[in-house]
Image (spheres, rainbow, N blue to C red):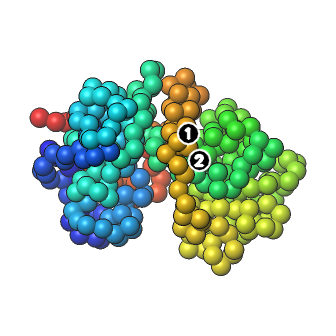
Amino acid sequence: MRTVRFHENGEPVDVLRLETAPVPEAGPGRIRVAVHACGLAPADWALCRGLFPGSLPRGIGCDVSGIVEAVGAGVTDVAVGDRVFGTADFAGQPSAGAAERAVLDHWFAVPEGLDLIRAAALPMALSTASWHLARLGLAADHTILVNGAGTTIGYAAVQIALVRGARVIATAGQTYTEQLRDLGATVVGYGEGLADRVKALGVGQVDLAFDTAPPNGALPELVEIVGGDPKRVLTCSDVAAAPELGVRDTFHEDPAKRTDDELFGVFTEFAQLAAEGRFTVPVAGTFPLADWRKALEISLTGHARGKLLLLPACDAD
């Protein structure tokens, strides 16, 4: 099969290549799918640079949708031919989702009404946003500011918070301003002076802030916005600046993971909402597997404005 992977750590443009590799086996507790769509994300480039080091070669592309073609020992909830979406076993396999076949370690049924392209855009944004909102202790009586609501994680977080009954202030540029307002969020521009703009909204106390924007020096103003308590701010992006300010960040949170039952509940709930047109992760573009470098170049600009997806089957021989 064809796959995009790296044999040494380094800059993704230097170490990644499209090559032929053996089709992976679905071991115990795993399934193998024929990949329909695979989402790319900045996390993939961090893996290339050495995040979560492990055995090499290793593939990219954690978000996957496709058709089940092999089921490992102990798996009873899916059958060959089922439509699923989920996460590739990037740590346990020499290839990942950016391939014609992929082994998944977590998977969920694609409900009727949800196409496989939109399904592949969901996993990382949905799991990351929901995990961070849970860590913040978001409740229905809270007002939360989502900084960087135009990112895939931020856009997902806005929707999750609204579904949970919270009041949402979203910082965003022009690309998604109208869509975010249509969802029910109050939208303000990002950048210097954010605290004053939020105060001018007259919304009262902002309880929590979730920072998903590329690092831009916003954390001090986010702390000000939530009343000066840095523990009410959580960032998944500016992890370098967070410790000095006392702001919480992804890598210093309690490492305990949610249970599989909790993950199943979140994914099934929001996949169904996506099928009904009530939840989405924006898709910025789709590319044949052979055009993976074009997708990489767009991603590295930091201005993808949505999920970038590879479609391995569309240029297969």
Task: Check contact, mark 2 vs mark 1: CB within 8 A.
Answer: yes
Displayed quadrant of residue 167 = top right
Q: Position of residue 22 (x, y in %)?
A: 12, 49
Q: Residue at x 51, y 33 (%)?
A: 268
Residue that lies at the very extreme toward the front in this rendered image? 74
Q: Residue at x 52, y 42 (%)?
A: 261
Query: SS of the residue at dot 1?
Result: helix
Name the residue type under label 2: Ser
In the figure, 247 relative to 150: above or below?
Answer: below
Q: Residue at x 28, y 70 (%)?
A: 9
Which numbered disc, 2 or 1, marks the residue that appears first in the sequence?
2
Q: Residue at x 26, y 60 (%)?
A: 58
Q: CA distance from mark 2 to mark 1?
A: 8 Å
Q: Which mark is residue 266?
A: 1
Displayed quadrant of residue 92 = bottom left
Residue assigned mark 2 = 130
Regarding residue 285, the answer to whether it shows in the image is no
Quarter that holds the C terminus = top left
Residue that lies at the very extreme toward the top in this rendered image? 112
Label 1 crowd bin: few (<14), some (14–19), many (20+), radius 10 Å: some
Query: SS of the residue at dot 2?
Result: helix
Q: Position of residue 226 (x, y in %)?
A: 79, 60
Label 2 crowd bin: few (<14), some (14–19), many (20+), radius 10 Å: many
